[in-house]
Image (tube, coloured by chain):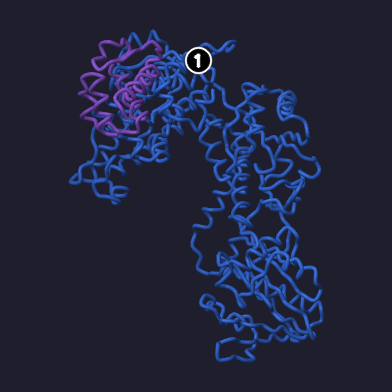
Chain colours: A purple, B blue
Amino acid sequence: MTKEEVFSRLTEVFRDVFDDESIEISESTTSADIPDWDSFEHINLILAVETEFGVKIPMGKAVTLKNVGELAETIISML
Amino acid sequence: MRELEYPFDGNYIIKKKKSLRRQLLSEEGVRFTPLRIAILGGETTNDIKNVMELFLLNNKIQPEFYESEYNRYYEDAMFPNEELESFKPELIFFCTCNRNIAEFPEITDSNELVESKLQSTYERFQAMWDHVSTTYNCPIIQNNFDPPMFRLMGNRDSWDIHGRTNFINRLNQLFAEYAAAHENFYIHDINYEASVIGLSNWSDSSYWHMYKYGVSVPAIPFFSFNVSNIVKSIIGKNKKVLMLDMDNTLWGGVIGDDGADNIEIGQETAMSQVYSEFQSYVKSLKSLGVLLTVNSKNDHDTAVKGLERPDSILHPDDFVSMKINWDPKSRNLVDTAAELNLLPESFVFADDNPAEREIIRQEVPGASVPEIGNSPEHYIEILDRSGFFETTNLSADDLKRNEMYQANAARSAAKASFQDYDDYLKSLQMNGEIQGFVPAYMARIAQLTNKSNQFNLTTKRYTQSEIEAVSADPSYIDIYGKLTDKFGDNGVVSVVIGNVRNNECHIDLWIMSCRVLKRQMENAMMDALVHECKARGLQKIVGYYYPTAKNNMVREFFADRGFNKISEDTDGNTVWEFDLTADYTLQNTVISVNKTEDC
């Protein structure tokens, strides 16, 4: 799966979880850029990402991700 | 909303919860019942609350929540709390888990210390419930405890008082006793929930360590669904009626094509047992006060015969209404609702046919149409876990009608030990139905001839048409035996076929199912055979035993019945004779045969 494909599917996941069709994400997107992205929603986001890509992100990774770029790299490394 | 009906996709609900909520609130013409719920948690409850809201909205209940700070359930409950007081909760939910048990036993603890830890853990909760119920005077829902993540001593953990499993089970028992003694106090049984979805799915320690969720996030929808079922039951929004299709729902097959004798119900095949188990479940719902109705596309008189079979567990008088006709099922449902003076939304419609389910969904909004699929082995599971009839209050009248109590009494009687084996057999209250073949059992009889290997004297196999030919031919004596005891119906368990020639009955087949060994069923069959032979004026019975790798258990069977051995060849084949001219003493002393009685 290419990075573009991962980003395209990630965008859909973000839009579902935050219920906002206008969300655009990039490598540098962080929780500060999305108003609803608090620690509670982070759990749901990780679960939705895991379901979408069929991977299980280890606990150590899930709590230290810096931005969406790192999230995408983590996914690609596990596919 | 389909997405919120059991069986649901929990991860989908978590992901889409915001848009699901938006859709539920934007439905036009829905009148919600408002409800103020205080969630006092020993763990994080954020998503538990959010998903509960979805399930409650789906039941037309609009909750407003008070949520305690993380792990402040005890303080919020016990001490003056202006915010909670002004919130005026109408329901309080204590959302705690085994992580909230402060003091588990240590292996080195004395028995007294373990007991004191148990009592102090319990009393802390008890004091809280007592205090809250007088302060807020509203229903309380309390989680019991989920099983522990690990078992230090392995299996011993379950019975040794130092084991965490044992400690949790005993705490849960104390919680249950409190619930039994206090109205308006309800247990949310997370111990059972964890077992349904599996402990590994239930509890993932990473969710605890990262977010302080005692239940793993993917399990939250299942958890919240179950609490919501208790809430809607307390609010009085339970379903009241179970409306059932007949063909392939209450029995296997199409009665209009197959005839009442050939539908699958009873104990004769695996599928018929599945349908019987489902009928038993439905009948138990009736004893809880659920109204049963039929909605079936059939000829009325033909279809009712299915419920009139002696081995049908449900009978026509179990149903308060039967719509058996060729009208659209949606019209039948609406008409039944009008007759019973109930709203269509009180109905649960169970039908194996997806097209019929879809018609009800389209035409009768509000009626529940569980996706029971078309595999009858899953009907009970889906209906049961859907929580339509979640029981929070059971009146004295309900209990009086409750047949389950009679069954429990029968079982505890059987636990008593018997000195004398015959006394034990008599206590089973066995009833035999022993007679010539009848159409309803031809298939089972043929099946039994092909399945029985151990208790089988000649190992002769028959097809169903051969069995039917034997039955129609007066030169054969054909006898089947069906055995019922107080624990249930064992179905057809024994078959004897004898060929009559020269005033003698030659035994072609004698078989019995091993599930009724040592019940004197073989004696009862012998009695019936002798009776029939004497009625025909025969002189003797000739028995044959042909040894196989599996039938050694009946090598001396004829000797035990009083036959004399006539010959034996080098392969061990033996021939036996029984003299019919002498007086005969009945061999069966414990089974009552061919006596009809209500059961």
B148 lies above or below B466: above
Q: Is residue B40 among what the camera can see?
A: no
Q: Position of residue B477 (x, y in %)?
A: 76, 74
Say which quarter of the image contains residue B433: bottom right
Residue B178, by quadrant, is top left
Answer left or right for B517 relative to B255.
left
Q: Which image quadrant for residue B506?
A: bottom right
Foreground pick, B153 / B501? B501
Residue B29 visible? The answer is yes
Q: Secondary structure at mark 1?
A: helix
Residue sitting nearer the eye, B284 or A40:
A40
Residue B70 against residue B416 in the figure, above or below:
above
The x, y position of residue B45, in whole percent, is: 34, 22
Q: Residue at x 69, y 76 (%)?
A: B586
Extreme residue toward the left, this view: B108
The residue located at (75%, 60%) in the rendering is B439
User: Which one is nearer the viewer's eye here, B559 or B441?
Assistant: B441
**Mark 1 sits on what residue?**
B23
